[in-house]
Amino acid sequence: MIMDISTTTGRIRAWCDMQFVDHGLVRAVYNNLYDLGGGMYRSSQPSPAQLRRYKARFGLRTVINLRGAHGYGSYALEREACGQLGIPLHDVKLYSRTPPEIEEVHAMDELFKSIQYPALLHCKSGADRAGLGAALYRILHLGHPVEAAMSELGWKYGHFKQAKTGVLDFFFATYVARNRQSPIGFLEWVNTEYNRLEMHDRFRAEGWASLIVDKVLHRE
């Protein structure tokens, strides 16, 4: 349920929740903000003050919230701030510990085609879901090679391949391995060969490292 900020008490509660429960105090110091090119930026959850700053600095015209609508105070305050600034807010639910659904990949593709730029995509910390969204943006919208776009899932953003979130690396690395066997477009692979549940089970059994070492790098 979205927090009610229509009263002073509700607004104070939402602000405290954003800062102390949803880790807003950390993001106030470091917002994990990076320029992806083509008018897209990635970051952690922005506060209303940060949104106003990005509007003034970048001319921000769209915000993509990869957390989906949620009950933290940060969402209620973000939604209000976007409304006040005249910035459309798109709520998309991505996940950090399971491979993306085929429909989610296509939804992101359509969103990148339809929104106004400059735009900002964000999750909570700007590490995992923002990394997935950023990689998909570079692949689907900018036409970057998947190998290059995978760098959006990196330690400098707070993403760690060795954790359960490594399933996102596994998703892209599986495509890279398949494409090296015989060329196939990323969306064609997603549409015709990709099996999310099978990949999730494989990742739990093998981990991402075995795929990269054995099938991509061809190490002995």
Image: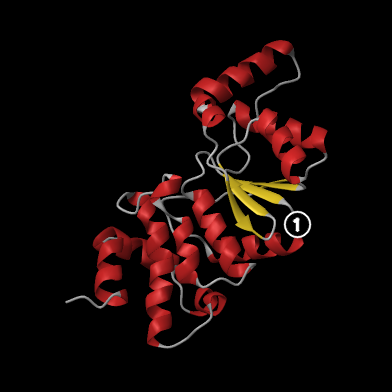
Nearer the observer, 10 or 143 = 143
In the visual, does 182 lie left or right of 102? left
In which quadrant of the rendered image does the C terminus lie?
bottom left
Position of residue 174 relative to residue 156, above or below, is below
Q: Secondary structure at mark 1?
A: loop
Give how far across and how far down residue 129 sits, in percent.
Answer: 51, 50
Viewer can see residue 143: yes
Position of residue 115 relative to residue 63, above or below, is below
Residue located at (46% from left, 49% from top): 128
In the visual, does 76 lie left or right of 156? right
- The residue pinned by badge 1 equals 115
Viewer can see residue 66: no
Give how far across and how far down residue 125 sits, in percent.
Answer: 50, 39
Q: Amino acid at mark 1?
A: Ile
Residue located at (45% from left, 63% from top): 150
Q: Quadrant of residue 24?
A: top right
Residue located at (42% from left, 65% from top): 171
Residue located at (62% from left, 20% from top): 15
